[in-house]
Amino acid sequence: MAEIKYEIKENIGSISQSPKGWNKELNLISWNGKEPKFDLRDWAPEHEKMGKGLTLTVDEVRALRDLLNGLEL
């Protein structure tokens, strides 16, 4: 399997923490040297391991924001 390279350009914040200490974080990440995208996934405490996640463009984040703002919680 090919090695995946990533660089966390900006840590925007954590939205939860599991009992094992992993954080669900929103970050701006460059994957394999490409343009950074917004990324939401679980990370081990020192970012040495990651879980499956969701990567979004700026336009997708805006669309998600609009959807969430329309919710009545």
Image (cartoon, rainbow, N blue to C red):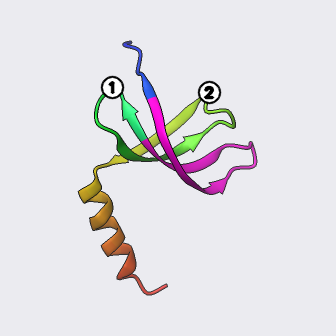
Residue highlighted by disc 1: 33
> In the rendered view, does 13 fall on the left or right side of 19?
left
Q: Which mark is residue 48?
A: 2
> In the rendered view, does 59 fall on the left or right side of 39?
left
Residue plotted at (67% across, 43% down)? 22
**Which is more N-terminal, label 2 or label 1?**
1
Residue at the extreme left of the image, as rendered: 59
Front residue of this view, candidates 64 and 38:
38
Residue plotted at (49% across, 84% down)? 73
Residue at the extreme top of the image, as rendered: 1
Residue at the extreme front of the image, as rendered: 9
Q: Quadrant of the N terminus?
A: top left
Residue 10 position, x and y percent, is 49, 44
Q: Contact (CB < 8 A) between labels 1 and 2?
A: no
Badge 2 marks a residue whose secondary structure is loop
Q: Residues within 10 Å of mark 1 (few under 14, many from 20)?
A: few
Q: Which stretch appears magenta?
A: 7-28
Separation of marks 1 and 2 at Cα, in angstroms: 18 Å
Q: Residues within 10 Å of mark 2 (few under 14, many from 20)?
A: few
Residue depth check, mark 1 versus mark 2: number of the one nearer the observer: 1
- For the residue marked with disc 2, what is the amino acid? Glu
- For the residue marked with disc 1, what is the amino acid? Gly
